[in-house]
Image (cartoon, helix red, strand yellow):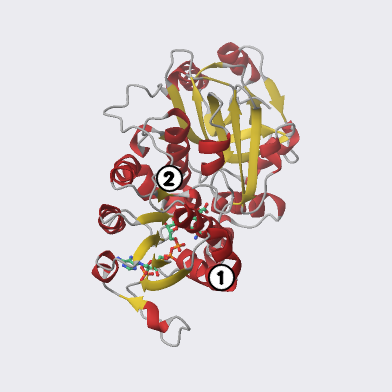
């Protein structure tokens, strides 16, 4: 018998409780032991809730109750989630979480505590929402050396880009719908500026390469500078713009994690991932490449991953089999993105083709309907990012847009 506590009764926490009771009988069969939710912790009151008898406002009720062996954290943020999760793990309770900020900033430490206490710290819901990707990378791909991971890791921004491009919806309106649907972070700046995708690529990088990658070490750009004109050029070029989180091994043995919008050609499956869906490509020596795809955010898709982890925590009670990685003292194993070789889409105003050729040599020009006479858009040949910056400066005129072309294998 295992008693569960759920921390946070917002979108994900309430989804977890509702899904658990909806499918309780089959969940218990899969867990191989009787399960029930004993506590729900939230700072808010929920008058008239069918779960009224379970609410508490005190974490001590949970930490000090030996009957509770599994805790599902869905409050978000680092404080006080970190203190609550740490206290539970130190008592030997397994913790499952959807909180990517917590895992990206404190994962190595919390995993070490779980190992020491012979319990588990699981976070399938932290990356890719409903998509099973953490466990498959940790277990099913264990025989591989992973060389790169690249994916659409944020449902809100993919939803916004899809609405802007397919329905010509305004950015603010698309964001409002994503918030109403429960996709966005409490502060949606984290979504649109790429910080949420950054936390997720930190988790995937740590998992793939065995050393904790902290968000501050990752170059990160969001979607706020993308315009409808850029999207039109991308379509005419034969692709789409997506916010991509990626990490790859570099020739000098380091790794390069990064988050940025990218031009992706039609031949790459990532270009066809729309709406709130996420997709993650993993490149590895034995499998070549595998793709994980599904809903990247939302109440029940995320609850699905949390409940899956609860079942695993119950099945693995008394053992510590969570994925794990070392903490890292410094970022000397992270490559400088300025040394990366890139090809870039550039949109300019008031720049001549002669100037473009002088700076970049032969480029691929792209056109769009109603293109102003003084506007040029082109894709550069491959060059180092730092050389690109210098050449762009030498162009003169006005730079209306610049977006890297995804360099991962198709
Ligand atoms: P919500 O804001 O909807 O839910 C969080 C809940 O926790 C709120 O009810 C909040 O109350 C409560 N809470 C906050 N602080 C405390 C505290 N100190 N003690 C008790 N309760 C507290 O967020 P979501 O459910 O959307 O997200 C939860 C976590 O899951 C986040 O880390 C998020 O990034 C992650 N996630 C979310 C997904 C989604 O689709 N929404 C998908 C995957 C992961 P109050 O509102 O009053 O602050
Ligand atoms: N805000 C996040 C997203 C939630 O939109 O992807 C899922 O992690």
Q: Are marks 2 and 1 in contact (CB under 8 Å)?
A: no
Quadrant including the C terminus: top right
Residue at 27%, 64% (x, y): give it.
63
Between label 2 and label 1, give the one nearer the viewer.
Answer: 1
Residue at 33%, 47% (x, y): give it.
118
Decide: is 332 above or below 77.
above
Residue at image mark 1: 24
Residue at image mark 2: 195
Decide: is 402 above or below 27.
above
Q: Does residue 225 appear in this view?
A: no
Q: Looking at the image, which is closer to me, 128 or 124?
A: 124
Residue 394 locus on image (x, y percent): 48, 18
Quadrant including the N terminus: bottom left
Q: Is residue 10 left or right of residue 379?
A: left
Assess disc 1: are there few (<14), some (14-19) or many (≥20) residues with their C-alpha within 10 Å of its C-alpha: some
Q: Looking at the image, which is closer to me, 158 or 307?
A: 307
Residue 298 locus on image (x, y percent): 56, 61
Looking at the rendered structure, the number of numbered marks drawn on it comes to 2
Q: Secondary structure at mark 1?
A: helix
Q: Secondary structure at mark 2?
A: helix
Decide: is 380 above or below 95.
above
Marked residue nearer the N-terminal end (2 or 1): 1
Residue 218 locus on image (x, y percent): 40, 33
Residue at 71%, 35% (x, y): give it.
239
Q: Which residue lies most toward the bottom here?
A: 48
Q: Looking at the image, which is closer to me, 75 or 73?
A: 73
Q: Is residue 265 left or right of residue 129?
A: right
> Looking at the rendered structure, which numbered label has been put on residue 52?
none
Q: Tell me which corner region of the image, top left, top right, bottom left or bottom right, holds residue 60.
A: bottom left
């Amino acid at each position: 018998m295992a008693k569960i506590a759920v921390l946070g009764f917002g979108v994900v926490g309430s989804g977890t409780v509702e899904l658990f009771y909806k499918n309780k009988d089959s969940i218990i069969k899969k867990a191989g032991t009787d399960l029930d939710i004993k506590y729900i912790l939230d700072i808010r009151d929920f008058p008239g809730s069918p779960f009224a008898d379970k609410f508490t406002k005190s974490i001590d009720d949970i930490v000090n109750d030996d009957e509770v062996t599994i805790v599902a954290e869905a409050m978000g943020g680092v404080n006080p989630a970190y203190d609550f999760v740490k206290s539970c793990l130190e008592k030997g309770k397994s913790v499952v979480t959807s909180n990517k900020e917590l895992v990206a900033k404190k994962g190595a430490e919390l995993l070490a505590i779980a190992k020491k206490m012979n319990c588990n710290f699981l976070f399938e819901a932290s990356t890719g929402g409903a998509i099973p990707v953490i466990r498959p990378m940790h277990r099913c791909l264990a025989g591989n050396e992973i060389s790169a991971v690249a994916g659409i890791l944020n449902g809100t921004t993919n939803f916004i880009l899809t609405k802007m491009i397919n329905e010509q919806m305004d950015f603010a309106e698309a964001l409002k719908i994503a918030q109403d649907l429960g996709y966005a972070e409490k502060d949606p700046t984290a979504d649109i500026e790429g910080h949420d995708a950054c936390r997720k690529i930190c988790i995937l990088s740590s998992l793939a390469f065995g050393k904790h990658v902290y968000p501050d070490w990752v170059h990160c750009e969001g979607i706020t500078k993308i315009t409808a004109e850029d999207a039109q050029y991308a379509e005419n070029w034969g692709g789409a713009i997506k916010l991509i989180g990626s990490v790859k091994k570099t020739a000098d043995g380091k790794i390069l994690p990064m988050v940025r919008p990218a031009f992706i050609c039609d031949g790459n499956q990532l270009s066809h991932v729309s709406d709130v869906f996420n997709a993650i490509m993993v490149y590895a020596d034995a499998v070549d490449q595998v793709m994980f795809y599904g809903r990247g955010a939302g109440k029940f898709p995320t609850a699905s991953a949390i409940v899956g982890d609860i079942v695993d925590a119950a099945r693995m009670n008394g053992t510590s089999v969570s994925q794990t990685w070392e903490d890292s003292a410094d970022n000397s194993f992270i490559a400088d993105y300025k040394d990366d070789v890139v090809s870039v889409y550039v949109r300019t105003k008031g720049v001549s083709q002669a100037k473009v050729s002088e700076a970049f040599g032969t480029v691929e020009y792209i056109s769009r309907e109603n293109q102003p006479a003084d506007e040029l858009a082109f894709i550069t040949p491959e060059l180092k990012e730092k050389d690109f910056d210098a050449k762009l400066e030498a162009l003169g005129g006005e730079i209306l847009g610049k977006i890297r072309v995804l360099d991962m294998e198709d």
